[in-house]
């Protein structure tokens, strides 16, 4: 099935779902005056129609990025709220259907107050079970609407500095106490507030890091998304350098498809060039030696390597070549599933790996002693520091956002590590 038939089928389903919700709401507000019902109908279906048109336009027309984001966010919030309401509607329909069926079997009149939608019986007093259930659904649906809207207004750019001690027993004394900063998942194509983005960069630079890592997904799809943000991220610099890798979104697979093409290859070269223009040292299955006072450690970086459906472009054998003499090896690899999928079993000489990718699903709870997000049911390692034997992994939940333009509970992260040999 092609994309258009699938989208049309989905649209029909969503419109039927919309009708189901619409009729349920009217059933509990029978007391509305005809003019009120008429205006509610116009607003409901007018909004739905504009939303459907907007979604099709965002897919097939070259809309401004901001307009496309507004449309898709409105669609996401609307569908989320109606999905939350759906179980209440189904419970009410099943309840009324069961009552009607049992009453018919017993050959007695049906209790219309229990079976018919609220407001259909003129003699009905108080609130019926149907009315209670549906109104409870409406109130419950308002909870995600409120929280997700708040996440857009306050969470998207609420950058937080997280401080961690990174214990590396073989760390040369010359590196003791050095500051290493990590950012990940910029996703510049999702940004709509340059001032806020600049504020996050200034927050990072105020930490005066000795070394900076960027662990992939500079863009959503295409290199041109960095046009308005290249100068901002060029401000990231450190005495020992800024080192970066590519993430799964940087290859253009989600825009051009998985098959090779001239346009896709050019876009990738443009992304690579952007790293160069910002002064970042992009590691493509290779390593660098960082020297301080005659002592060295290794910084390794590979192309994207992920479990499941994500592409495996990374080549660890190339990145680790000629590094046996280095006492500490730090690996930049975008997808944390790479750690358990390849690094732990095959490369025990890697002391610590730095990743991003999960975003913490941009939704959840995260405190110093507890964290939860739905993404943990997909990724075993999804946020924070993990250890297995002598190897460590740190997963940064990201600087930017993708899809939903906000964050609830899982806020954008700037990580500052203190390198030390002492546990």
Image (cartoon, rainbow, N blue to C red):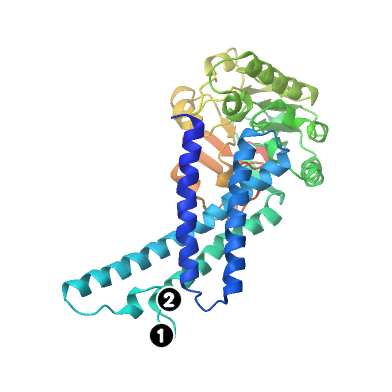
Please determine whether, in this image, residue 57 is positioned above or below residue 92. above
The x and y percentages for residue 222 are 68, 27
Badge 2: few (under 14), some or many (20 or more) residues near its Cα, within 10 Å?
many
For the residue pair 323 and 205, the one nearer the viewer reads as 205
Instruction: Point out the image quarter for the N terminus.
Output: top left
For the residue pair 34 and 303, the one nearer the viewer reads as 34
Which residue corresponds to the image point at 61% horizontal and 44% vertical from the top-left?
53
The x and y percentages for residue 340 are 46, 32
Asked if the residue at tag 2 contacts the one at tag 1, i.e. Cβ–Cβ closer than 8 Å, the answer is yes
Q: CA distance from mark 1 to mark 2?
A: 8 Å
Task: Say which residue label 1 marks.
Answer: 124
Please determine whether, in this image, residue 364 is positioned above or below residue 56. below
Please determine whether, in this image, residue 140 is positioned above or below residue 265. below
Which residue corresponds to the image point at 50% horizontal and 58% vertical from the top-left?
82
The x and y percentages for residue 144 are 56, 60
For the residue pair 305 and 53, the one nearer the viewer reads as 53
* Res 147 → quadrant: bottom right
* Res 203 → quadrant: top right
């Amino acid at each position: 099935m092609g994309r258009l038939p699938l989208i049309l089928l989905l649209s029909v389903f969503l419109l039927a779902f919309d009708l189901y919700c619409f009729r349920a709401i009217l059933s509990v507000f029978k007391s509305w005056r005809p003019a009120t019902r008429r205006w509610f109908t116009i607003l409901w279906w007018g909004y739905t129609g504009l939303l459907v048109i907007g979604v099709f336009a965002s897919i097939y027309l070259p809309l401004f990025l901001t307009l496309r984001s507004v449309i898709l966010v409105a669609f996401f919030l609307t569908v989320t709220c109606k999905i939350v309401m759906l179980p209440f509607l189904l419970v009410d329909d099943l309840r009324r259907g069961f009552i009607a069926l049992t009453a018919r079997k017993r050959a007695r009149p049906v209790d219309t107050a229990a079976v018919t939608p609220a407001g259909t019986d003129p003699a009905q007093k108080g609130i019926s079970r149907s009315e209670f259930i549906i109104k409870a659904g409406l109130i419950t649906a308002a909870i995600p609407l409120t929280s997700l809207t708040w996440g857009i207004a306050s969470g998207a750019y609420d950058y937080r500095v997280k401080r961690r001690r990174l214990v590396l027993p073989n760390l040369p004394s010359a590196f003791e106490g050095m500051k290493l900063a990590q950012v990940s998942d910029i996703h510049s194509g999702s940004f709509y507030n340059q001032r806020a983005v600049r504020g996050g960069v200034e927050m990072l630079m105020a930490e005066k890091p000795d070394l900076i890592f960027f662990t992939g997904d500079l863009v959503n799809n295409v290199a041109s998304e960095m046009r308005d943000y290249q100068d901002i991220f060029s401000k990231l610099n450190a005495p020992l350098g800024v080192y970066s890798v590519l993430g799964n979104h940087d290859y253009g697979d989600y825009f051009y498809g998985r098959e090779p093409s001239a346009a896709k290859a050019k876009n990738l070269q443009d992304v690579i060039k952007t790293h160069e223009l910002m002064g970042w040292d992009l590691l493509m299955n290779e390593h660098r030696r960082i020297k301080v006072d005659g002592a060295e450690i290794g910084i390794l970086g590979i192309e994207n390597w992920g479990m499941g459906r994500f592409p495996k472009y990374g080549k660890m054998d190339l990145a680790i070549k000629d590094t046996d003499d280095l006492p500490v090896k730090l690996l930049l690899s975008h997808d944390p599933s790479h750690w358990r999928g390849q690094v732990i079993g095959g490369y025990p000489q890697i002391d610590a790996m730095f990743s991003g990718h999960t975003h913490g699903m941009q939704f959840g709870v995260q405190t110093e002693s507890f964290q939860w997000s739905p993404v943990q049911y997909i990724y075993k390692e999804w946020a924070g520091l993990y250890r297995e034997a002598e190897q460590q992994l740190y997963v940064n939940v990201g600087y930017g956002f993708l899809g939903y333009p906000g964050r609830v509970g899982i806020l954008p992260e700037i990580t500052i590590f203190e390198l030390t040999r002492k546990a």
